[in-house]
Image (cartoon, helix red, strand yellow):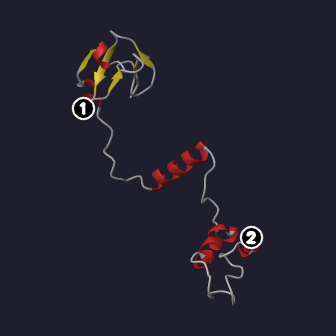
């Protein structure tokens, strides 16, 4: 890596008459150490990067398991779920672009006339979806 940067003007090679810091020196020269450290594989740690959705999911799951008593609210009680307002899906809730409706829980298409439960956040879900 040093050879690559040394061959680039202003990043490590001779920088103007008289060498480094002489007349004609480039302002980016002081950044060489930072670039070299950033691209130096010996500075990397195992697990610093993920390269797939599965790996990212594993990292997020591990972080969530490390903090089980987090600040997230507890799940809703069965009584609270049973007391959610329900109604039939009408055309007002269809997506304006697609003309379809999708359950916020299972992501399945829902037909006009199917029963839905309304959540306090204004989302809704198909009553047949399991919470």
Q: Which residue position holds label 2?
A: 4
Residue 26 or residue 53, whichever sits in front = 26
Q: How many marks?
A: 2
Establish if 118 lies above or below 90: below
**Disc 1 from disc 2: Cα separation:** 59 Å
Residue drawn at the location 45% of the way across and 20% of the way down: 108
The image quadrant where one finds the C terminus is top left
Residue drawn at the location 63% of the way across and 49% of the way down: 51
Is residue 111 shown to the viewer in this render?
A: yes
Is residue 89 shown to the viewer in this render?
A: no
Which labelled disc corresponds to residue 120? Answer: 1
Q: Are marks 1 and 2 in contact (CB under 8 Å)?
A: no
Residue 61 or residue 50, whichever sits in front = 50
Establish if 70 lies above or below 114: below
Q: Nearer the viewer, mark 1 or mark 2?
A: 2
Residue drawn at the location 69% of the way across and 67% of the way down: 41
Residue 66 or residue 79, whichever sits in front = 66
N-terminal of the pair, mark 1 or mark 2, is 2
Residue drawn at the location 73% of the way across and 76% of the way down: 6
Q: Quadrant of residue 30?
A: bottom right
Is disc 2 surrounded by few (<14), some (14 to 19) or many (20+) residues within 10 Å?
few
| Element marked by disc 1 | loop
**Residue 28 drawn at (x, y percent):** 58, 75
Q: Quadrant of residue 100?
A: top left
Q: Quadrant of residue 111?
A: top left
Establish if 75 lies above or below 26: above
């Amino acid at each position: 890596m040093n050879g690559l940067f040394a061959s680039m003007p202003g990043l490590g090679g001779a920088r103007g008459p008289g060498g480094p810091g002489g007349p004609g020196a480039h302002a980016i020269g002081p950044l060489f150490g930072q670039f070299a450290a950033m691209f130096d594989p010996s500075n990397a740690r195992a697990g610093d990067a993920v390269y797939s959705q599965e790996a990212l999911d594993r990292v997020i799951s591990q972080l969530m398991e490390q903090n089980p008593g987090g600040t997230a609210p507890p799940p809703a009680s069965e009584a609270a779920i049973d007391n959610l307002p329900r109604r039939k899906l009408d055309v007002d809730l269809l997506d304006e672009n697609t003309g379809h409706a999708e359950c916020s829980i299972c992501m399945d298409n829902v037909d006009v006339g199917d029963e839905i439960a309304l959540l306090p956040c204004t989302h809704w879900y198909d009553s047949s979806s399991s919470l």
